[in-house]
């Protein structure tokens, strides 16, 4: 069944590669529900004040994402455009992180910390022993090594803003939790001289704000598919294949070296990919994206990852479905990328005996919209509509991007998203 599903998605991608979906749409366009017509609708206003901080921005990709040097220059953030460069041109110091594309949020947070601050990735002595992988990972020079230090020019702590898409939003939340609260288990069982600063709990204030975009805070029912979400990442790789016209994606790293899943010298990418996808860890371990992105895994994560009082939290939701008059299910709108149409149909009709009901049907092709405004299941976090007055320690819900699928919002479609990200940066830079 997995092979048939993969073949169907690949055929859909072949159609998608023949030309841009929804050509001629303008930014912030909305497809009228229950019709194929288009109407222009502005995104809810990102109310900004005067610039009050110069903290750098770090872009954190989602599931199956990649870094700037991968995918033959086809950017995760912007596609053939480059959102990082665009923000830099507007005067915002910006960096793009590259963490494990199908790893757990704990492992990704540890990698994100090391990438920004610099140093060797430390997954934690307790954590790595519990889950059966290596404790240490790659070494990084640091995107912003002075992060957390006192700035000599203004006497203030060097902080950052995190802009995160999809699973990246969960990863950002875990990073903030560990910075602020640390890990009691790691502190109790690791000699002080060996303990990573990430687990000490002395990093309050190092993150000034986080903006999560299309994030499955309560998980996605896509993980309920028979094949699960890990094989689905093969279809995500088709994005660059279709966009660049290169059938064999070679410049891509699953970043699972700590699991012993490193690409060997001379090994073809196909062989490497199959070895990763056929690994037993997806069935035997919870230390994976497969678990964290599931509703049950997200609920478990929400139980210990809480909004920190010193941080500004913002969320943006997306959808590109409408309620069918024939079936009452949510079905993809005309302009949804074919890559997401099959999964959107599943999301738009799936229920179970637990808590996934018709409220979960609206989606953007990958994530249920109800899951995007902030963590709810298993969480005590407060989610409030943003009214122009940002509040720390609670979720400022910026609203819904109508008729944007999971790729549109990061520039993988016909829309140019650079202006929108500039607006978002202005909002975060206006925070006191």
Image (tube, rainbow, N blue to C red):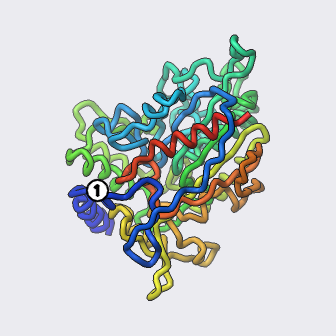
Residue 113 percent coordinates (x, y): 58, 30
Which of the pair 196/148 is nearer the observer?
Answer: 148
User: Residue at the location (55% across, 42% down)?
Assistant: 423
Which residue is nearer to you in this view: 187 or 373? 373
Which quadrant is home to the N terminus? bottom left
In the foreground, 214 or 263: 214
In the displayed orientation, state which residue is furthest to the top.
Answer: 152
* Side of 142 relative to 260 (left or right): right
**Of residues 287 and 130, the one drawn nearer to the viewer in this rendering:** 287
Residue 335, visible in the rendered structure: yes
Left or right placement of residue 19 versus residue 109 in this view: left
Residue where numbered disc 1 is placed: 20
In the rendered view, tell whether residue 235 sits above or below residue 411: below
Q: Residue at x 36, y 38 (%)?
A: 253
Whether residue 278 is visible here, answered yes or no, is: no
Question: Where is residue 200 shown, x and y percent of the image?
Answer: 73, 28
Which of the 4 quarters of the picture holds residue 432?
Answer: top right
Residue at left offset 36%, top offset 40%: 81
Residue 56: image location, x then y, percent: 58, 28
The answer to whether residue 396 is above or below residue 144 is below
The number of numbered discs placed on residues in the rendered structure image is 1
Residue at the image point whose x is 66% and y is 58% from the top: 299
Secondary structure state at the residue bearing disc 1 = loop
Give coordinates of residue 283: x percent, y percent. 47, 57
């Amino acid at each position: 069944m997995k092979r048939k599903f993969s073949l169907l998605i690949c055929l859909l991608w072949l159609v998608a590669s023949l030309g841009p979906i929804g050509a001629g749409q303008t930014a912030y366009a909305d497809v009228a529900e229950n019709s194929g017509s288009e109407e222009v609708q502005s995104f809810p206003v990102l109310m900004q004040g005067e610039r009050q901080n110069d903290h750098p921005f770090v872009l954190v990709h989602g599931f199956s994402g990649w870094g700037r040097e991968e995918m033959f220059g086809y950017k995760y953030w912007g596609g053939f455009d480059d959102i990082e460069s665009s923000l830099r041109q507007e005067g915002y110091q910006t960096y793009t992180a590259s963490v494990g594309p199908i790893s757990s949020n704990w492992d990704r947070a540890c990698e994100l910390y090391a990438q920004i601050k610099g140093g060797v990735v430390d997954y934690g002595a307790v954590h790595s022993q519990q889950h059966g992988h290596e404790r240490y990972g790659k070494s990084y020079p640091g995107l912003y090594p002075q992060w957390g230090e006192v700035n000599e020019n203004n006497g203030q702590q060097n902080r950052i803003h995190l802009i995160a898409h999809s699973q990246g939003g969960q990863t950002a939340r875990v990073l903030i939790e560990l910075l602020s609260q640390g890990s009691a288990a790691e502190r109790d069982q690791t000699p002080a001289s060996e303990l990573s600063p990430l687990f000490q709990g002395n990093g309050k204030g190092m993150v000034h704000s986080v903006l999560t975009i299309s994030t499955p805070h309560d998980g996605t029912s896509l993980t309920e598919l028979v094949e699960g979400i890990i094989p689905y990442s093969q279809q995500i790789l088709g994005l660059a294949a279709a966009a660049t016209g290169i059938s064999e994606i070679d410049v891509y790293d699953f970043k699972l070296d700590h699991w012993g899943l490193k690409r060997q010298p001379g090994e073809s990418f196909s062989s490497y990919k199959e070895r990763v996808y056929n690994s037993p860890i997806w069935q035997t371990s919870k230390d994976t994206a497969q678990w964290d992105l599931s509703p049950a895994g997200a609920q478990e994560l929400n139980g210990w990852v809480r909004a920190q009082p010193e941080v500004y939290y913002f969320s943006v939701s997306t959808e590109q479905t409408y309620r069918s008059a024939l079936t009452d299910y949510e079905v993809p709108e005309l302009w949804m990328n074919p890559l997401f149409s099959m999964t959107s149909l599943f999301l738009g009709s799936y229920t179970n005996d637990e808590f996934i009901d018709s409220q979960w049907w609206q989606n953007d092709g990958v994530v249920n919209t109800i899951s995007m405004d902030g963590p709810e299941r298993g969480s005590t976090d407060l989610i409030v509509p943003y009214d122009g007055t940002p509040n720390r320690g609670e979720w400022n819900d910026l609203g819904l991007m109508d008729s944007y699928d999971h790729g549109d919002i990061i520039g993988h479609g016909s829309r140019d998203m650079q202006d929108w990200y500039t607006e978002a940066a202005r909002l975060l830079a206006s925070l006191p």
